[in-house]
Image (cartoon, rainbow, N blue to C red):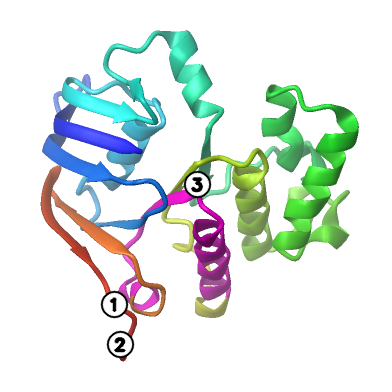
Amino acid sequence: MISARQLMLRYPTGKVALSGVTLDVGRGEFVYLTGESGAGKSSLLRCLYGGVRPTSGQLEVGGTDLRAARAGQVRKLRRSVGIIFQDHRLLFSRTVFENVALPLRVQRWKPDRLVARVRKVLAFVGLEDRLWSFPEALSGGEQQRVAIARAMSAHPPLILADEPTGNLDLDTARRIMDYLMELNRQGSTIIMATHDLQLMETHPGREIRLHAGALVGDAARREAGA
């Protein structure tokens, strides 16, 4: 799914966000990105969905060379990637239905199929009764569940999550993790930036640790008590 070789990212300010990162992520893996604030977790995710172009090195995501890709190729890749942000990034002027339907409209799904899919993914996250609500009427946890429904609506093979539980209470965070784990079981590759070691102990996955833009650890974690 992902292949990076000596990946470097330097922002126009001169800050080096990623320095010589080399890694491979196979299809169907659940991967945690860990590290201190500023370690490069969000920058790596931005590279993976084409939000920024690497300065040097090699990066392929789903067969697309993101250093050489044209704008149209990047747009096509993004249609196959679900993105979950910590701050949700929902459209507050649109209903829950419209937020979740957005990726499907971009892909020009037919209306009857689109409606059925939106209802199905909202049922998955337990929000089928909030179809016509606006995001401002929802709690933070509910908004994050809408963001998950939107990210999964078009059956993406890759889902990127940037601190999706960072602003949530423990019980809500665990529920969000349960949803992500189920999506992984259904076949999606999940890459999640997090600093929550407690959740990582109860929801096992591979841990890739960054420090000052460099990869300093790569290991599978085991469930607590295993």
Quadrant where the N terminus sits is top left
Occupied quadrant, residue 64: top left
Reading the image, the residue beneath label 1 is 222
Question: How far from the left and from the top, in percent, is residue 195?
Answer: 31, 64
Q: CA distance from mark 3 to mark 2?
A: 31 Å
User: Mark 2 falls on what kind of element?
Assistant: loop
Q: Can you say whether 109 is above or below 120 in the image?
A: above
Label 3 belongs to which residue? Answer: 85
Q: Residues within 10 Å of mark 1 (few under 14, many from 20)?
A: some
Q: Are marks 3 and 2 in contact (CB under 8 Å)?
A: no
Work out whether residue 19 can be spotted: yes
The span picked out in magenta is 172-200
Mark 2 belongs to which amino acid? Ala
Name the residue: 78% across, 60% down: 123
Camera-side residue of 161 and 104: 104
Residue drawn at 39 percent across, 25 percent down: 50
Mark 3 or mark 2: which comes first in sequence?
3
| Residue 212 at least partly seen | no
Give neighbour class at mark 3: few <14, some 14-19, many 20+ (Cα, 10 Å).
some
Q: Is residue 104 above or below residue 213?
A: above
Q: Is residue 219 left or right of residue 46?
A: left
Q: Quadrant of residue 207?
A: bottom left
Reply yes or no: does residue 178 show up in magenta. Answer: yes
What main secondary structure does the magenta stretch of the protein show?
Answer: helix
* Residue type, label 3: Phe
Question: Total of numbered circles in the picture?
Answer: 3
Residue located beneath label 2 in the image: 226
Gap between marks 3 and 1 measured at Cα:
26 Å
Front in this rendered view, residue 159 or 131: 159
Q: Residue at x 56, y 57 (%)?
A: 186
